[in-house]
């Protein structure tokens, strides 16, 4: 079986994966082919996405952080790769023809049933910590356009209302409109569609003045994500 080449076919298959986490319960592995189908749609997506990035994310169903020794691996007949995870459970996902052809599997060193696995779209973190308001709005709109492409029913009535900056702890969460006071930081999950309060999060909501301002993050966030309502 060869990797899917048609974008239409990729999107049709990815619709069951993108935007909807996979709950692993009854086996000790996940299909690389299934994950590939969910991930490759973004690679083949032809509309603007310069402000976005995609990862393969593992998250605890109860919203707790992953254990420090948690491991995600790709195993096939001719390969064994560790896929390092960042602080919010994201891995760079390798799109490998050999792994697809071998029907490789994804494994973790924990019981799978306690975790969910999904493609995760987020906004690229700027190294200088300065974000143009107009670009944050554009990034959110790009993310929404993509989600509507792969999951029209789930996102048809959604709108971009802001972006979320995620930090490990509150002292790091200093995000403000340039020249203003720090915005409120509250406990919450790393991404708006998750559960839990393991992180410190700052939500920057869009308003009429957004496109003329700049958002400054004094410390590098773990993630920046779109907020849809």
Image: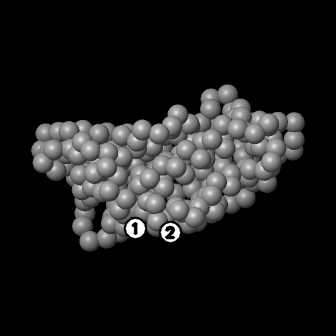
Quarter-of-image position of residue 91: top left
Relative image position of residue 108 (x, y in whole percent): 32, 55
Write down the residue under mark 1.
114
Relative image position of residue 83 (x, y in whole percent): 35, 42
Q: Residue at x 79, y 37 (%)?
A: 213
Q: Residues within 10 Å of mark 2 (few under 14, many from 20)?
A: few
Quarter-of-image position of residue 29: bottom left
Write down the residue under mark 2.
62
Position of residue 193 relative to residue 33, above or below, is below
Horizontal side of 118 relative to 126 (left or right) equals left
In what element is the residue under mark 2? loop
Q: Earlier in the sequence, mark 2 or mark 1?
A: 2
Horizontal side of 140 relative to 171 (left or right) equals left
Pick the front one: 15 or 205: 15
Give how far apart the Cα atoms at labels 2 and 1 are. 8 Å
Q: Residue at x 35, y 52 (%)?
A: 11
């Amino acid at each position: 079986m060869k990797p899917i080449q048609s974008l239409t076919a990729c999107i049709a298959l990815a619709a069951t994966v993108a935007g909807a986490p996979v709950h692993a319960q009854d086996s000790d592995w996940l299909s690389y082919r299934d994950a590939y189908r969910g991930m490759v749609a973004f690679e083949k997506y032809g509309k603007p996405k310069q402000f976005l990035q995609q990862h393969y994310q593992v998250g605890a169903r109860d919203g707790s952080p992953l254990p420090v020794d948690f491991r995600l691996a790709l195993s096939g007949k001719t390969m064994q790769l560790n896929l390092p995870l960042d602080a919010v459970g994201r891995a760079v996902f390798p799109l490998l023809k050999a792994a697809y052809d071998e029907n490789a599997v994804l494994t973790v060193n924990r019981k799978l049933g306690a975790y969910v696995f999904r493609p995760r779209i987020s906004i690229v973190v700027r190294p200088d910590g300065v974000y143009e308001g107009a670009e944050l709005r554009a990034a959110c709109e790009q993310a929404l356009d993509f989600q509507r492409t792969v999951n029209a029913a789930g996102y048809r009535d959604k709108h971009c209302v802001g972006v979320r900056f995620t930090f490990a702890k509150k002292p790091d969460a200093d995000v403000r409109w340039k020249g203003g006071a720090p915005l409120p930081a509250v406990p919450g999950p790393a991404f708006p569609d998750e559960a839990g309060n393991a992180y410190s999060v700052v939500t920057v909501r869009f308003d009429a003045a957004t496109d003329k301002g700049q958002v400054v993050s004094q410390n590098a966030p773990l993630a920046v994500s779109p907020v849809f309502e």
